[in-house]
Amino acid sequence: MVIDLDRCTGCEACVVACHAENNIATVGEDQAARARAMHWIRVERYYEGEFPNVKTKFMPVPCQQCGAAPCEPVCPTFASYHTIEGLNGQVYNRCIGTRYCANACPYNTRFFNFYNPVWDKPLDLQLNPDVSVRSEGIMEKCTFCVQRIKAGEVQAAAEKRLVKDGEIQPACVQSCPTQAMVFGDLSDPESEASRLARSNRATRLLDELGTFPKVTYLQRGSWHDNENA
Amino acid sequence: MERRDFLKISALSGAAAALDACGNPEHQLIRFIPEEDLTPGIATWKPSVCTLCPAGCGMLVRVMQGDAEVVRKGQLGLLKMGLAKKLEGNPAHPVNEGKLCPRGQAGLQVTYHPDRIRTPLVRSGPRGSGQFKEVTWDEATKQLAGQLSALASGKQQDRLAMVVPPLRGVKKSLLGAFAAALKAPAPVEFAFLDGGVVAAADAASFGPAEPPTADLGHSNYVLSFGADFLGTWNSPVAQSLAYGRMRAGRPGKRGKLVHFEPRISLTAGNADEWIPCRPGTEGALALSLCHVILRDKLAPAADAGHAGTLIEGWAQGLPDFDPEKAEQQTGVPAATIVRIAHEAATHQPAVALAGDSATAHTSGLFNALAVNALNALLGSAGKPGGILFTPAWTPSLGKTAEKSQAGGTLPALVKRIQSGPDAVKALLLFGANPVFAAPAAMQVREALEKVPFIASFGSFIDETSILADVILPDHSPLESWLDDAPVSGTARTVAKVAAPAMEPVHNTRGTPDVLLDVAHQLGGEAATALPWKSYDEALKAAFAPLQHEKGSVSATDPDEFWSKVREQGGWWSAEEKSLPVGGGKGSGVAATAAAPAFDGGADAYAFHLLPFATQMQYDGSLAHLPWMQEAPDPLSTVMWGSWVELNPATAKKLGIEQGNLVEVASQHGSVRAPALLAPGIAPDVVAMPVGQGHESFTRYASERGANPIAILAPMTVTGTDALAWAATRVKVARVGEGKIILFGARLHEMPEDVKHR
């Protein structure tokens, strides 16, 4: 995935789209106060400087789907594992809730279910039947909408063709009003995501930890780049 | 234990488990025979229209089969039905091109809200107590028709009033026709954020009476005066799409965004330069930019055409707005003004936008006219990369609709109600919530309490509908026939229509159908003026003329046309063609309006109160959705509450720390909320989000946070009748310890009593 910070406005359409797609529980005021709100993707906001010279920056942070993920080797039950396609998978029915993975994750993108989720009826009718609902004691995280990836692959296989670039979009990418997010196959050098990941604006979050994150951020440009061009 | 005993025990517990299952009420529900033919696990996509803000984005609804507990003919049971599971933007739609904002995404929760009104209600306790009893649709419509025919037989139809949110398209025509057929005054339109000032300024400067469509995608320089166009202003998704293209959509070119406002909004946060100016002086700032452009001969005065002639002193080069004088007035350094003016004039196409607080001061209309003049001077009016005007669709439902009289404003309605006993005998409410969204000083609640009969068509019990005598709940948008005619976000004519995406979950009825039913019950003229059996017939009739226009749907016969339009979610013109920008109607706003007036003296009330619509709760109409409560505000990261935003230096002076409970008091009342210290706000301004502070608005929003609208002064924007909601001064004091929930809070800031479970 590539996220262009020059386009991102921090509007959080991705955050709500993710909740809707992935059956993420709303924990309520008291649990939210205990830092237990579950946002598989969040928008981080940074202020720099003091009034009146203040700069604001926004950065959406989903699971970085690390190539060498710190969350995987620490799991005693192999609930956190590396899928053949390179995702950091989470098998809910293997998870016993040690939370080692959340401690190991440098990006804070893993969320623990302290309680069974509750949807006041009939809010339960909004649940996406393609995604399992997680119960108390289970760790959950961004999956890059693996249900959409699988559905796209099945569809392509049924039509006896390869998956087209841009055909599969996670919920956050599909919703993004500024088209800041691009999803694609990084092992295909011709994909739009690969092309953007080679941009001279490309950076990776906490890359120095050796996690090999699969999310590439394109840094904000400045107006003067334009002037000099 | 012997093996035999073990088997016995397991058999017993197995039986017990089976009996337990019988005790589960879900297993006792009868199953209705499904009305739809659906394949389990396969999603179908149905077009729909987002109704949560005036942008009018097109949606696709993912519908899948599921079991819903529903009431059919008075019997509770389980029904296998198509259920909306996810909302996406409609990629074919000219306004939002497949994209959707966070509020649009949450539209699903309106339909499935646990506190939606499920069946018609009649008041059973004192007014405002919230006690209602369930009645049948026959009883409820009979009550309404009875009231209306009593008015008709007493020749008192002028004593009927209707309050609606701003409407467009066929629904507006239908309500107008309904009012005209009853010989009642036209509906009063009301919303906190109504955009009327910008439309009035555009009508005066350029002709079209509508908000502009900013063609940011082709702009090199964007000047935003208060307009939070990436957050909540006008058509946020269309503007965000264009903004993305402005930033990174053109190889080698990156447009610049400069935002003028006393506080960092979502748009200011994304600007290359955020320049705080004194509240209400945005127009003076725009004219100072014009002054520099004229003085330094970057463009001749005549370029601005009619929009320039509206400004006093334009031909003389705006002598009152030289940068030094403007620095005194606006607080923006003269050197900055000169630099920005030169940058804008030399990096065309450049575009300027005015909105939100800049147009909600007493000087709001003047500010908007000044920004229009700047646009005209920069040569961006009606040009690519500038501001365009949507050739909006205006459907016709025949002569009756056009005959409807002007409805007037909410303050005029309040005055009418209070002008004497029974001056208004019956009031119909169509989802607007003026008791919450109008200042307490306007006395809307007190006025409504005097009306003998109030009927509400809303889906929730809010501050206004709690006063109703009878509630006839509408379908949710996803269960309704919808239509819309966007006035911004595209240069195409767009006429949208969508059939219900799903069957109703509750015992509700579409309001347009109820009105048609009531009109037929009344008979006579009302019945002949509204001949359609149902709303979709009226829609089909209104869309029929479009068959012969060049657009996205071509068909040979009317039925084929109608079915193709519904399949596509609407009709839009083939060509992008902005309305012509010509001479406007002129305006009577003098240059003296450049100085904004405020309610409350500067000595006693030291701070400007800046209310603002939030990304999640909008103007408060979305505070009832749990997703919108738990999604953190993008700037403050506050969840499940409201806050008072203060500059850290100001807070220090007042002895206020982050999270302290603070009282904000104007001449008209006070509210309390926790303090949030943020660097992005001027020291003499305090900002509060509108949206929270509901007294009655479902389990998720009631008694949560504070409503700053309540304490606003009932001032109007000079030259219009719009509320000047940014013109109130307040005083601020710490009153105790408070609680604020920040998503950005670090772990060590967690309350000490929190231990592992």
Image (spheres, coloured by chain):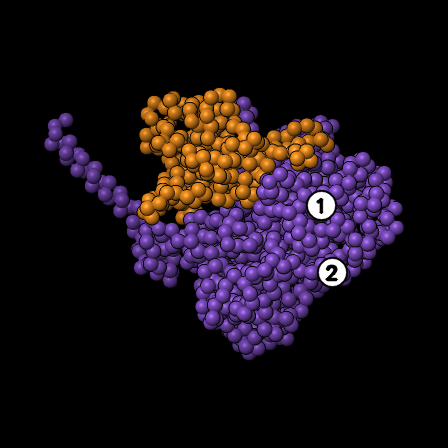
Chain colours: A orange, B purple
Label 1: element kind: loop
Question: Which residue position holds label 1?
Answer: B348
Q: Quadrant of residue B396?
A: bottom right
Judging from the image, mark 2 belongs to the subunit labelled B
> What percent of the width, then of the height, locates residue A129?
37, 45
Query: Which dot marks residue B218?
Result: none
Label 2: element kind: loop
Query: Is residue B460 shown above or below A185?
Result: below
Q: Nearer the viewer, residue A32 or B564?
A: B564
Judging from the image, mark 1 belongs to the subunit labelled B
The residue depicted at 70 percent of the width and 40 percent of the height is B258
Say what amino acid the circle numbered 1 marks: Gln
Q: Which of B547 and B750 is in front in this view?
A: B547
Q: In which quarter of the image is residue B590?
A: bottom right
Measure the C-alpha gap from mark 2 to mark 1. Answer: 21 Å
> What percent of the width, then of the height, locates residue B751?
53, 26
Question: Which residue position holds label 2?
Answer: B582
Q: Nearer the viewer, residue B443 or A131?
A: A131
Query: Is residue B478 shown above or below A227?
Result: below
Observer-side mark, 2 or 1, equals: 1
Other-residue count near label 2 (Cα within 10 Å), few / some / many at <14 / 14–19 / ≥20: some
- B312 with respect to B612 (left or right): right
Say what amino acid the circle numbered 2 marks: Gly
Other-residue count near label 1 (Cα within 10 Å), few / some / many at <14 / 14–19 / ≥20: some
